[in-house]
Image (tube, rainbow, N blue to C red):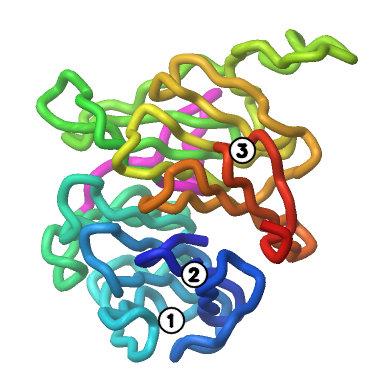
Amino acid sequence: MAFDSGALVVAADGIWISGDGGARFSASGLSAPAVTALATHPDRPGLICAAQEAIGLTMSADGGKTWRGIGGALPPAPIDAMAIAAQDPALFYVAVRGDGLWQSKDSGESWEFAMDRPFQEQAERDVLALASVSSPSGMGGIWVFAGTELGVIKVPDCFCRWQEIGNDGAMDSLVSGQAALPALRLPREPARSLVLAPSVPNVLFAGLPSGIWRTDDTGETWRLLTDALASPVLAVDPLEPSHIVAATTDGAILSSRDGGLNWAAPAAI
């Protein structure tokens, strides 16, 4: 999921768009096969990029009405994640399964290999989610965060070295019946959704099997917002960063208007 100029864009068999936060949807001009990755950018209204099974990358410049193929130079393998650079809406990143990260500096017209997959626990891990974070890395650029089957990892956009954010022991720290959940490190679980509003780069949300997690300090510490939604797909409205939408594994849509503290069906908001 993603937001485009306040509209919620949802990937399924094709692309579906909602102007009321997920209460009602209409089909875009992109139909099946299934979409495996999706990206938009607040500085380019109408831009929607989608990766489709057996087809590759397609892009719309008019909010989903018309589409054209891009990414012909990419390896012929599934694309599991995509992001557009926070500070440059012409700079695209994609994660190719079994291969690594690729980038395009011209909105998908040409591509170059950027980075091997993260090496964690004696093996390379596929990237399942990507987020460009407009926060200085200290290495002349900003951070790119990635979700893998072992949690969240990050790399500067110079793509010199993957860095762990330190996600050991989180679930061991949870106390049953606790009134308020403390700041914790992320558990080492598959992170298939990783989102933020570029205007608030220190605040990220991660969807894990244990629930929805939030960091307010660019990944240094995390807290569990809710354990009622397992492995949700998330989207943050860049025009209203406290507005978060979650899609459950059974296809239900829930919305929060207070940064993830309270959730309800969109029609009830």
Compare marks 2 and 1 and give the one earlier in the sequence.
2
Mark 3 residue element: loop
Residue 164 image point, x, y percent: 43, 20
Q: Is residue 201 left or right of residue 181?
A: left
Could you tell me which residue is drawn at 33 percent across and 87 percent down? 67
User: For the residue marked with disc 3, what is the amino acid?
Assistant: Gly
Compare marks 2 and 3 and give the one earlier in the sequence.
2
| 250 or 57: nearer the viewer | 250
| 113 or 205: nearer the viewer | 205
Residue 202 image point, x, y percent: 37, 27
Within 10 Å of disc 2 (Cα), the crowding (few <14, some 14-19, many 20+) is many
Q: Which residue is mark 1?
A: 55
Check if residue 253 falls in the magenta segment: no
Q: Which residue is mark 3?
A: 260
Residue 220 image point, x, y percent: 44, 15
Could you tell me which residue is drawn at 44 percent across and 29 percent down? 153
Within 10 Å of disc 3 (Cα), the crowding (few <14, some 14-19, many 20+) is many
Compare marks 1 and 3 and give the one earlier in the sequence.
1
| 22 or 267: nearer the viewer | 267
User: For the residue marked with disc 1, what is the amino acid?
Assistant: Ile
User: For the residue marked with disc 2, what is the amino acid?
Assistant: Val
Could you tell me which residue is drawn at 34 percent across and 62 percent down? 40
Q: Is residue 109 left or right of residue 134?
A: left
In this rendering, the count of numbered labels is: 3
Q: Which residue is mark 2?
A: 9
Give the alpha-carbon distance from disc 2 to disc 1, as whole Å.
20 Å
Give the alpha-carbon distance from disc 1 to disc 3, as whole Å.
35 Å
Mark 2 residue element: strand
Region rendered in magenta = 113-130
